[in-house]
Image: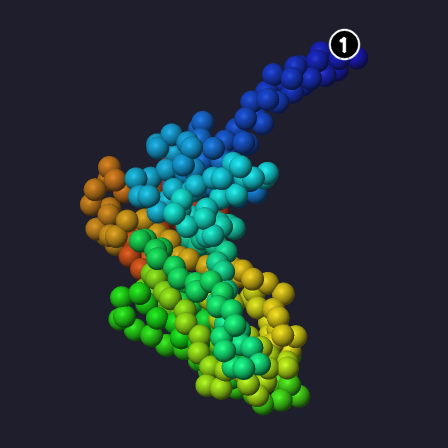
Amino acid sequence: MVIYRLLLKVVVLEIIILGPYHNHIAEADDSMTKPGCRSFCGNLEIPYPFGSNDSDPKCRIYDDSFRVYCDNSFEPPIPHMNIESPRFHILHISLQDHELRINTSISKACYDSSGERQYLGFKPSLILQKFPLSSAKNKFTAVGCDTSARFRDRNGKFSFGCMSSCKNITDVSNGSCSGIGCCQTSIPKNTFDYQISIGSDYNHSDVLDFNPCSYAFVTVNDFYTFSVGDLKQPEFDQSPLVLDWAIGNQTCEEAQKNRTSYMCTENTNCTNAENGLGYKCNCLEGYRGNPYLQNGCNGM
């Protein structure tokens, strides 16, 4: 009994002494940021190599594209892509998929009974220095009858679009986006900027009673499902889209020649960006964490 009590005291003492230590290690293993750096802006976790604008510059990499502007005037604070474009609210940053999800406004053009353009909403445009639109996870979508929408890059290198037509609301089906009330098309790779414009052949004169406006937007594939009611008014005025991100403008092979600037750390591998330029670091199979931090990838 005496021996049992002594063993019990030792176990309790180990728990008291080592408990906080183990908690600290667990927190360190799960940390996505450098020590002393801001890890959240509102509900957004900010993983290194990204960093907030009000943290030490060492909390992020040199590229301004990785700077997260945190608007602390709101509660909770709202993170933006950059200070010049507050409408680009950052929703999520993924280290595993190397994706950035942001909110953007949709384009809208309406007509009155005389056929005049009654109201022209914000014409969405996006200018990115570093991160291209995901060609795999986004679609360009237009909603409306008597509607044509065009997507073009700002430098005029390419443009594309789709047309949507219908004369009667009974011709339109929920969930269908094949050109009757709604149309969609893919986004090409290496697209870093765009402007959206909307046109109409007959200014909605034949469909005004159930479809006074045309809408167009870029959004992630799983966000939008067409509904007949959207011809009158969609239930949203902003839509999320996905950007791909990578490090620098070199391939893995080129970056590995300079071990000082190469960013993949222990227990990681390197892959070249499939969209845009640069390379991506990932934890090896059986490890998890942040592949851009020292000792960031730990065994599961």
> In percent of the image, x 42 and y 42: which residue is there?
68
Please, which residue is most extreme toward the right here? 1
In-front residue for pair 16/275: 275
Q: Quadrant of residue 51?
A: top left
Question: Between residues 124 and 10, which one lies in front from this camera angle?
Answer: 124
Q: Is residue 54 above or below residue 11?
A: below
Q: Is residue 164 visible?
A: no
Q: Position of residue 276 (x, y in %)?
A: 31, 60
Does dot 1 land on a helix, a strand or a loop? helix
Q: Position of residue 197 (x, y in %)?
A: 41, 72
Q: Is residue 222 left or right of residue 54?
A: right
Q: Residue at x 24, y 46 (%)?
A: 256
Q: Position of residue 183 (x, y in %)?
A: 50, 79
Q: Which residue appears at 70% of the width and 13% of the height?
A: 9
Question: Label 1, on which residue?
Answer: 2
Disc 1 residue crowd, few under 14, some 14–19, many 20+, Cα 10 Å: few
- Nearer-the-camera pick, 209 or 267: 209
Q: Specify whether residue 201 is in view.
A: yes
The three-letter code of the residue at mark 1 reads Val
Relative to 242, is 14 on the left or the right?
right
Quarter of the rendering containing residue 14: top right
Seen in the picture, residue 208 relative to 66 is either above or below; the reply is below
